[in-house]
Amino acid sequence: MRTMPTSQASSAFRAIRIVRWTTILLIFLLALVDPFQGRANLSTWSLVLVFAGYNLLLNLLRIRFGWLSSYAHTAVLDLAVAGTLYLLGAEHGGPLYVLIFLAVVCAAATLSLRDSILYVAAASALIIVGESTLYERPSVAEAVRDLGARTIMLMLIAVGTTTIVRRLQVEQEVAREARLETERVAELDRLRTNFVAAVSHELQTPLTAMRAALGLLEASASDRLGFDEKLLVTNARRNVDRLTLEVADLLTLNQLDANSLQLEKLPLDLRATIIDAMAVLHPLAEQKEQKLEVDIDEPLSVEGDRRRLEQVIINLVANAHRHTPAGSRIVISGRNTPNGVLLTISDDGPGIPPHARDRIFERFCQLDPAGGGSGLGLTIVKAIIERHGGHVSIKSADQKKGTTFSVVLPRLNGES
């Protein structure tokens, strides 16, 4: 006999208790409305109370002592008790007959389909034996027709109940597995987040030290280094700068995923932020002999996080640097507009195909994997700008006229 998992068995028991007590209450009310005296002057309603007491005793034994934890035993008792009470009621097809239906339904809810069919066969046999003592034997044809109809009805109830319950159990199991998988993925994501955060923090310190050491070496020992040695130091510093940018992006993305990115908003002039970013951007441009120009002739006053806005500028220029050929031109310009402070980063590279513009800010989107980069820079740009109350957009007329990224930020309060 197949047993259900503990959680499913508990759910089945709760549902069975509700069905049983609801049915008992309805039969009791029906017996009061239309009373009938059975054998030994026992009224139908009193026999219903006996069945209620039997159910109460079962519940107490199960709760207090853990007896009858398997419903298979209860199902056998149900059939014996229900059949006995039906015979004592001595009313052919009366309200007490519903108790046999109740026993079949409760058994079908917990037993396998094969066991449910056997249970119905046992219930039919009990009815045949019992009803032969209740009234005069009818004609054979009438008896067969009556018994066949009720057996078919019991069989349909048993099969239908078993099918529905098994379907619900399968759906519960699927839902449970889906929930466990979701929890597993969430745990893996948490571990991944913690790992990236730890690695990023650990890498920042040595990278900063390496960058400072290479810069000092390049400045102080330049006259003592040969051409090839200078080239090695310069390339090493550029690679450290590139790796520093990648680590910064990973750490920022990790903070965005954890919803822990904090902005220290202060009044600032974007021109000063751009000048700070030039220390990182000029070596990138020199690597491909690109021209990096700044076209800003007025203060650009905003309230923002200086370090995060510098990261935005670096990522946008680094994106243009990667996707434009050697000798191209990159221009950073800015001006005050009625809608806010407008900052643009333009290049004269090959441009972006129209079908790719809608997904350019998606995570890990790389139009040209050979160009390098993690595919996170523009995602981070969009997130930081939106957290400053601004927005970023892209304009690329065709694939030959370059690309312009436009960033609009709210102007500092009180500025006209």
Image (tube, helix red, strand yellow):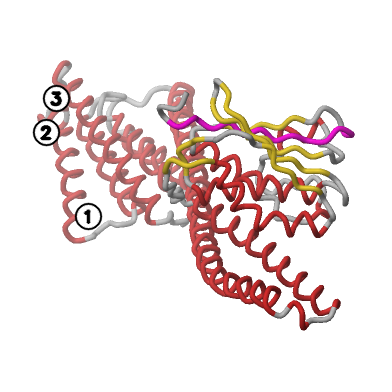
Above or below, 97 relative to 182: above
Numbered range of the magenta stretch? 399-412
- Determine the residue located farthest toward the front in the rendered image: 223
Nearer the observer, 64 or 24: 64
Give the side of residue 371 with respect to residue 186, left or right: right
Q: Rounded to the nearest whole Å, what is the CA distance between mark 2 and mark 1?
A: 32 Å
In the structure shown, which secondary structural element does the residue marked by tag 2 occupy?
A: helix
Q: Mark 3 vs mark 1: which is more N-terminal?
A: 3
Q: Name the residue at 49% across, 45% down.
A: 175
Which amino acid lies under the numbered mark 1 shown in the image of this protein? Answer: Arg
85 drawn magenta? no
- Determine the residue located farthest toward the bottom in the rendered image: 224
Badge 3 vs badge 2, beta-carbon distance below 8 Å: no
Q: Which residue is mark 3?
A: 37
Which amino acid lies under the numbered mark 2 shown in the image of this protein? Answer: Ala
Above or below, 407 relative to 233: above
Q: Which residue is mark 1?
A: 62
Badge 3 vs badge 1, beta-carbon distance below 8 Å: no
Give the side of residue 228 with respect to residue 149, left or right: right
Q: Name the residue at 60% across, 43% down.
A: 381
Above or below, 45 relative to 288: above
Residue 124 at x, y = what percent?
41, 37
Nearer the observer, 264 or 153: 264
Which mark's residue is nearer the viewer, 2 or 1?
1
Label of residue 40 in the image? 2
Q: Mark 2 vs mark 1: which is more N-terminal?
A: 2
Q: Rounded to the nearest whole Å, what is the CA distance between mark 3 and mark 1?
A: 33 Å
Residue 406 at x, y = what percent?
66, 33
Which amino acid lies under the numbered mark 3 shown in the image of this protein? Answer: Gln
